Image: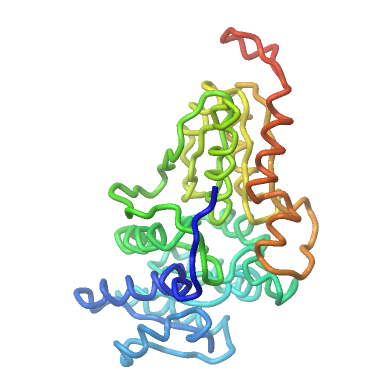
Amino acid sequence: MGIAYTSLDTTKLSTAEVYAHTLCELAQDDPRIVTLTADLAKSTKIGVFQEKFPERFVNVGIAEQNMFGMAAGMAACGLIPFTCTFAIFNSCRALDQVHTDICYQNLNVKMIASHAGTSFGQAGSTHHATEDIAIMRAMANLVVMVPADGQETAAAVRAAIAHQGPVYIRINRGFDQIVYPQGIEDFQLGRANLLHEGSDLCFIACGSAVFSALQAARELAAEGIKARVLDMHTIKPLDKEAVKKAVHDTRRIITAEDHTVVGGLGSAVAEVIAESGMGCALRRLGIQDAFSPIGYHEDLMSLHGIDANGLVRAARETLKMDFEEDDDWTDEV
Protein backbone atom coordinates (compact mmCIF):
# COMPACT_ATOMS: atom_id res chain seq x y z
CA MET A 1 0.00 0.00 0.00
CA GLY A 2 1.54 3.33 -1.07
CA ILE A 3 1.07 6.96 -0.12
CA ALA A 4 0.00 9.62 -2.64
CA TYR A 5 2.23 12.63 -3.31
CA THR A 6 2.08 15.60 -5.66
CA SER A 7 4.93 17.32 -7.47
CA LEU A 8 4.71 20.15 -4.93
CA ASP A 9 5.81 17.76 -2.17
CA THR A 10 9.06 16.62 -3.77
CA THR A 11 11.30 19.36 -2.42
CA LYS A 12 9.94 18.99 1.11
CA LEU A 13 10.56 15.24 0.98
CA SER A 14 14.11 15.55 -0.35
CA THR A 15 16.66 14.18 2.09
CA ALA A 16 19.17 16.67 0.71
CA GLU A 17 16.86 19.62 1.38
CA VAL A 18 16.25 18.39 4.93
CA TYR A 19 19.92 17.91 5.78
CA ALA A 20 20.81 21.37 4.44
CA HIS A 21 18.12 23.11 6.50
CA THR A 22 19.02 21.05 9.57
CA LEU A 23 22.65 22.06 9.17
CA CYS A 24 21.62 25.72 8.96
CA GLU A 25 19.62 25.41 12.17
CA LEU A 26 22.50 23.80 14.02
CA ALA A 27 25.02 26.29 12.64
CA GLN A 28 23.07 29.17 14.21
CA ASP A 29 24.30 28.09 17.63
CA ASP A 30 27.57 26.43 16.65
CA PRO A 31 30.09 28.65 14.83
CA ARG A 32 32.40 25.67 14.34
CA ILE A 33 30.16 24.27 11.59
CA VAL A 34 31.44 25.03 8.07
CA THR A 35 30.63 23.49 4.70
CA LEU A 36 32.58 22.64 1.59
CA THR A 37 31.48 21.45 -1.83
CA ALA A 38 33.15 20.59 -5.12
CA ASP A 39 31.06 22.75 -7.44
CA LEU A 40 27.89 20.89 -6.49
CA ALA A 41 26.12 23.37 -4.20
CA LYS A 42 22.91 23.24 -6.24
CA SER A 43 22.85 19.48 -6.81
CA THR A 44 23.61 18.61 -3.18
CA LYS A 45 21.28 21.39 -1.88
CA ILE A 46 24.00 22.87 0.33
CA GLY A 47 23.44 26.17 -1.46
CA VAL A 48 20.90 26.88 1.28
CA PHE A 49 23.79 27.02 3.75
CA GLN A 50 25.79 29.22 1.37
CA GLU A 51 22.99 31.79 1.28
CA LYS A 52 22.73 31.91 5.07
CA PHE A 53 26.40 31.65 6.01
CA PRO A 54 28.46 32.73 2.98
CA GLU A 55 31.56 33.29 5.12
CA ARG A 56 31.42 29.67 6.32
CA PHE A 57 30.96 28.11 2.88
CA VAL A 58 33.75 27.09 0.49
CA ASN A 59 33.35 25.95 -3.10
CA VAL A 60 36.64 24.35 -4.11
CA GLY A 61 35.60 23.78 -7.71
CA ILE A 62 35.74 20.41 -9.42
CA ALA A 63 38.51 19.18 -7.13
CA GLU A 64 37.17 16.64 -4.65
CA GLN A 65 40.61 15.54 -3.47
CA ASN A 66 41.46 19.12 -2.53
CA MET A 67 38.13 19.49 -0.73
CA PHE A 68 38.79 16.59 1.62
CA GLY A 69 42.33 17.74 2.28
CA MET A 70 41.03 21.22 3.16
CA ALA A 71 38.32 19.71 5.37
CA ALA A 72 40.97 17.74 7.25
CA GLY A 73 42.93 20.94 7.89
CA MET A 74 39.81 22.74 9.12
CA ALA A 75 38.99 19.88 11.49
CA ALA A 76 42.56 19.93 12.81
CA CYS A 77 41.98 23.60 13.68
CA GLY A 78 38.85 22.83 15.71
CA LEU A 79 36.13 23.41 13.13
CA ILE A 80 33.41 20.89 12.18
CA PRO A 81 33.54 20.72 8.38
CA PHE A 82 30.73 19.12 6.37
CA THR A 83 31.78 18.07 2.88
CA CYS A 84 29.01 17.79 0.28
CA THR A 85 29.48 15.83 -2.94
CA PHE A 86 28.16 12.80 -4.77
CA ALA A 87 28.72 9.48 -3.01
CA ILE A 88 30.66 8.04 -5.93
CA PHE A 89 33.16 10.92 -5.83
CA ASN A 90 33.43 10.74 -2.03
CA SER A 91 34.12 7.01 -1.93
CA CYS A 92 36.11 6.48 -5.13
CA ARG A 93 37.58 9.63 -6.66
CA ALA A 94 38.86 11.08 -3.39
CA LEU A 95 39.38 7.89 -1.40
CA ASP A 96 43.10 8.50 -0.84
CA GLN A 97 42.39 11.79 0.95
CA VAL A 98 39.45 10.30 2.89
CA HIS A 99 41.65 7.40 3.97
CA THR A 100 44.88 9.22 4.82
CA ASP A 101 43.93 12.82 5.59
CA ILE A 102 40.70 12.14 7.49
CA CYS A 103 40.22 8.56 8.73
CA TYR A 104 43.86 7.76 9.52
CA GLN A 105 44.09 10.93 11.60
CA ASN A 106 40.60 10.36 13.09
CA LEU A 107 39.59 13.94 12.30
CA ASN A 108 36.16 15.39 12.98
CA VAL A 109 35.02 15.64 9.35
CA LYS A 110 31.40 14.89 8.43
CA MET A 111 30.87 13.69 4.87
CA ILE A 112 27.46 14.10 3.24
CA ALA A 113 27.43 11.72 0.27
CA SER A 114 24.43 12.38 -1.97
CA HIS A 115 23.07 10.71 -5.14
CA ALA A 116 23.88 7.34 -3.55
CA GLY A 117 23.07 3.90 -4.91
CA THR A 118 21.11 4.08 -8.14
CA SER A 119 19.16 7.18 -7.09
CA PHE A 120 20.75 9.10 -10.00
CA GLY A 121 20.09 6.12 -12.21
CA GLN A 122 19.68 8.00 -15.47
CA ALA A 123 23.23 9.39 -15.18
CA GLY A 124 24.79 5.97 -15.72
CA SER A 125 27.56 4.00 -14.04
CA THR A 126 29.89 6.98 -13.63
CA HIS A 127 27.36 8.43 -11.16
CA HIS A 128 25.95 5.27 -9.57
CA ALA A 129 27.38 4.75 -6.08
CA THR A 130 26.83 1.04 -5.62
CA GLU A 131 30.10 0.18 -3.87
CA ASP A 132 30.46 3.01 -1.38
CA ILE A 133 29.13 1.23 1.73
CA ALA A 134 31.62 -1.60 1.22
CA ILE A 135 34.47 0.86 0.71
CA MET A 136 33.65 3.24 3.53
CA ARG A 137 32.85 0.65 6.21
CA ALA A 138 36.38 -0.71 5.70
CA MET A 139 37.86 2.64 6.80
CA ALA A 140 39.06 2.53 10.41
CA ASN A 141 37.60 5.19 12.75
CA LEU A 142 34.74 5.96 10.32
CA VAL A 143 31.04 5.85 11.25
CA VAL A 144 28.77 4.97 8.31
CA MET A 145 25.08 5.94 8.31
CA VAL A 146 22.41 5.33 5.66
CA PRO A 147 19.18 7.11 6.67
CA ALA A 148 15.85 6.09 5.17
CA ASP A 149 14.17 9.48 4.67
CA GLY A 150 14.42 13.19 5.42
CA GLN A 151 13.48 12.96 9.09
CA GLU A 152 16.09 10.28 9.70
CA THR A 153 18.66 12.27 7.75
CA ALA A 154 18.09 15.22 10.09
CA ALA A 155 18.57 12.91 13.07
CA ALA A 156 21.73 11.48 11.49
CA VAL A 157 23.20 14.97 11.02
CA ARG A 158 22.57 15.79 14.68
CA ALA A 159 24.12 12.48 15.75
CA ALA A 160 27.12 13.16 13.52
CA ILE A 161 27.81 16.48 15.21
CA ALA A 162 27.51 14.89 18.64
CA HIS A 163 30.00 12.19 17.64
CA GLN A 164 33.69 13.06 17.83
CA GLY A 165 35.34 11.67 14.73
CA PRO A 166 34.76 11.17 11.00
CA VAL A 167 31.26 10.29 9.78
CA TYR A 168 29.91 9.27 6.37
CA ILE A 169 26.19 9.91 5.76
CA ARG A 170 24.83 8.34 2.58
CA ILE A 171 21.70 9.94 1.10
CA ASN A 172 19.81 9.75 -2.17
CA ARG A 173 19.50 12.24 -4.99
CA GLY A 174 16.31 13.85 -3.75
CA PHE A 175 12.70 12.71 -3.56
CA ASP A 176 12.23 9.90 -1.06
CA GLN A 177 9.22 8.13 0.37
CA ILE A 178 8.35 8.97 3.96
CA VAL A 179 9.26 6.33 6.52
CA TYR A 180 8.98 8.51 9.64
CA PRO A 181 5.94 10.80 9.16
CA GLN A 182 5.96 11.75 12.86
CA GLY A 183 9.71 12.27 13.10
CA ILE A 184 12.11 10.28 15.26
CA GLU A 185 12.09 10.71 19.02
CA ASP A 186 14.96 8.41 19.94
CA PHE A 187 17.59 8.10 17.20
CA GLN A 188 20.74 6.43 18.46
CA LEU A 189 23.85 5.93 16.41
CA GLY A 190 24.53 2.19 16.16
CA ARG A 191 21.06 1.06 17.22
CA ALA A 192 18.59 -0.25 14.64
CA ASN A 193 14.98 0.95 14.63
CA LEU A 194 12.28 -1.71 14.85
CA LEU A 195 9.55 -0.53 12.46
CA HIS A 196 7.35 -3.62 12.19
CA GLU A 197 7.17 -6.60 14.53
CA GLY A 198 7.15 -10.16 13.22
CA SER A 199 8.27 -13.69 14.02
CA ASP A 200 8.17 -15.50 10.65
CA LEU A 201 11.06 -13.66 9.02
CA CYS A 202 12.98 -10.40 9.31
CA PHE A 203 13.77 -7.76 6.72
CA ILE A 204 16.93 -5.82 7.57
CA ALA A 205 17.16 -2.80 5.28
CA CYS A 206 18.84 0.57 4.91
CA GLY A 207 18.23 3.71 2.86
CA SER A 208 15.52 3.58 0.20
CA ALA A 209 15.04 -0.17 0.75
CA VAL A 210 13.50 0.50 4.19
CA PHE A 211 10.29 1.80 2.63
CA SER A 212 10.23 -1.25 0.35
CA ALA A 213 10.57 -3.51 3.39
CA LEU A 214 7.67 -1.80 5.16
CA GLN A 215 5.47 -2.14 2.09
CA ALA A 216 6.41 -5.80 1.76
CA ALA A 217 5.70 -6.46 5.44
CA ARG A 218 2.23 -4.95 5.11
CA GLU A 219 1.47 -7.02 2.02
CA LEU A 220 2.67 -10.20 3.71
CA ALA A 221 0.61 -9.38 6.81
CA ALA A 222 -2.51 -9.56 4.64
CA GLU A 223 -1.55 -13.18 3.93
CA GLY A 224 -1.02 -13.94 7.62
CA ILE A 225 2.78 -13.76 7.38
CA LYS A 226 4.46 -11.84 10.19
CA ALA A 227 7.53 -10.00 8.90
CA ARG A 228 9.78 -7.99 11.18
CA VAL A 229 11.37 -4.86 9.70
CA LEU A 230 14.62 -3.41 11.04
CA ASP A 231 15.84 -0.05 9.77
CA MET A 232 19.61 -0.55 10.01
CA HIS A 233 20.44 3.14 9.59
CA THR A 234 23.94 2.70 10.99
CA ILE A 235 26.05 0.22 9.03
CA LYS A 236 29.11 0.87 11.18
CA PRO A 237 28.93 0.32 14.09
CA LEU A 238 26.27 -2.29 13.28
CA ASP A 239 23.60 -3.22 15.82
CA LYS A 240 24.79 -6.80 16.35
CA GLU A 241 22.32 -7.53 19.13
CA ALA A 242 19.35 -6.62 16.91
CA VAL A 243 20.66 -8.96 14.21
CA LYS A 244 21.21 -11.86 16.63
CA LYS A 245 17.77 -11.36 18.19
CA ALA A 246 16.20 -11.41 14.73
CA VAL A 247 18.01 -14.66 13.90
CA HIS A 248 16.92 -16.26 17.17
CA ASP A 249 13.30 -15.13 16.83
CA THR A 250 12.68 -15.70 13.12
CA ARG A 251 15.43 -17.95 11.69
CA ARG A 252 14.91 -16.22 8.35
CA ILE A 253 16.80 -13.01 7.45
CA ILE A 254 16.48 -10.98 4.26
CA THR A 255 18.72 -7.94 3.81
CA ALA A 256 17.86 -5.23 1.30
CA GLU A 257 20.03 -2.37 0.07
CA ASP A 258 20.47 -0.14 -2.99
CA HIS A 259 24.09 -1.29 -3.23
CA THR A 260 26.09 -4.28 -4.37
CA VAL A 261 25.60 -7.38 -2.19
CA VAL A 262 29.40 -7.63 -2.00
CA GLY A 263 30.62 -5.93 1.17
CA GLY A 264 27.52 -3.90 2.00
CA LEU A 265 24.75 -4.27 4.57
CA GLY A 266 24.12 -7.89 3.62
CA SER A 267 27.77 -8.76 4.14
CA ALA A 268 27.88 -6.94 7.48
CA VAL A 269 24.82 -8.86 8.68
CA ALA A 270 26.25 -12.15 7.39
CA GLU A 271 29.44 -11.53 9.37
CA VAL A 272 27.46 -11.13 12.58
CA ILE A 273 25.48 -14.31 11.92
CA ALA A 274 28.60 -16.33 11.09
CA GLU A 275 30.41 -15.18 14.23
CA SER A 276 27.35 -15.88 16.40
CA GLY A 277 27.39 -19.58 15.55
CA MET A 278 23.64 -19.49 14.91
CA GLY A 279 22.13 -20.94 11.75
CA CYS A 280 19.43 -19.36 9.63
CA ALA A 281 18.21 -18.85 6.10
CA LEU A 282 19.86 -15.70 4.71
CA ARG A 283 19.02 -13.85 1.50
CA ARG A 284 20.98 -10.76 0.46
CA LEU A 285 19.01 -8.53 -1.88
CA GLY A 286 20.74 -5.79 -3.80
CA ILE A 287 22.80 -5.46 -6.95
CA GLN A 288 24.21 -8.91 -7.63
CA ASP A 289 27.91 -8.23 -8.29
CA ALA A 290 27.26 -6.21 -11.44
CA PHE A 291 27.10 -2.66 -12.72
CA SER A 292 23.58 -1.34 -12.86
CA PRO A 293 22.14 -0.28 -16.22
CA ILE A 294 20.88 3.24 -16.82
CA GLY A 295 17.31 3.98 -15.78
CA TYR A 296 15.03 5.73 -13.34
CA HIS A 297 15.54 4.88 -9.69
CA GLU A 298 12.18 3.18 -9.18
CA ASP A 299 12.71 1.04 -12.29
CA LEU A 300 16.19 0.01 -11.16
CA MET A 301 14.89 -0.86 -7.70
CA SER A 302 12.41 -3.18 -9.39
CA LEU A 303 15.02 -4.60 -11.77
CA HIS A 304 17.35 -5.46 -8.89
CA GLY A 305 14.55 -6.94 -6.77
CA ILE A 306 14.75 -4.41 -3.96
CA ASP A 307 11.31 -2.90 -4.38
CA ALA A 308 8.32 -4.21 -2.38
CA ASN A 309 7.51 -6.86 -5.00
CA GLY A 310 11.06 -8.16 -4.95
CA LEU A 311 11.07 -8.40 -1.17
CA VAL A 312 7.73 -10.22 -1.13
CA ARG A 313 9.03 -12.76 -3.66
CA ALA A 314 12.16 -13.33 -1.61
CA ALA A 315 10.08 -13.74 1.56
CA ARG A 316 7.85 -16.39 0.01
CA GLU A 317 10.89 -18.33 -1.20
CA THR A 318 12.63 -18.08 2.17
CA LEU A 319 9.54 -19.22 4.05
CA LYS A 320 9.72 -22.57 2.24
CA MET A 321 12.75 -23.46 4.36
CA ASP A 322 11.91 -25.45 7.49
CA PHE A 323 13.63 -25.41 10.87
CA GLU A 324 13.46 -27.54 13.97
CA GLU A 325 11.66 -26.18 17.00
CA ASP A 326 14.67 -26.32 19.31
CA ASP A 327 17.66 -24.20 20.22
CA ASP A 328 20.29 -26.57 18.85
CA TRP A 329 21.92 -24.46 16.15
CA THR A 330 24.52 -27.06 15.12
CA ASP A 331 22.24 -28.99 12.74
CA GLU A 332 20.58 -26.07 11.01
CA VAL A 333 21.04 -24.62 7.51
Describe residue 143's horizontal placement relative to residue 265 as left or right.
left
- Can you name the residue that lies furthest to the left here? 29
Asked whether residue 252 is in view, the answer is: yes
Describe residue 314's horizontal placement relative to residue 97 as left or right.
right
Pick the residue in front: 26 or 211: 211
Q: Which residue is drawn at 52% across and 71% down?
A: 174
Picture quadrant of residue 110: bottom left
How many numbered marks, from 0 up?
0
Asked whether residue 144 is in view, the answer is: no
Picture quadrant of residue 162: bottom left
Q: Residue at x 45, y 65 (%)?
A: 105
x then y, percent, for residue 70: 45, 82
x then y, percent, for residue 279: 64, 21
Residue 60 in the image: above or below residue 275: below
x then y, percent, for residue 157: 37, 64
Q: Residue at x 60, y 47 (%)?
A: 265
Residue 316 in the image: above or below residue 213: above
x then y, percent, for residue 59: 46, 90
Residue 256 in the image: above or below residue 176: above
Pick the residue in front: 294 or 329: 294
Q: Which residue is drawn at 59% across and 66% down?
A: 116
Pick the residue in front: 125 or 303: 303
Figure colour scheme: rainbow
Describe residue 106's horizontal placement relative to residue 127 as left or right.
left
Q: Where, quadrant-wise, is the C terminus in this rendering?
A: top right
Residue 214 in the image: above or below residue 55: above
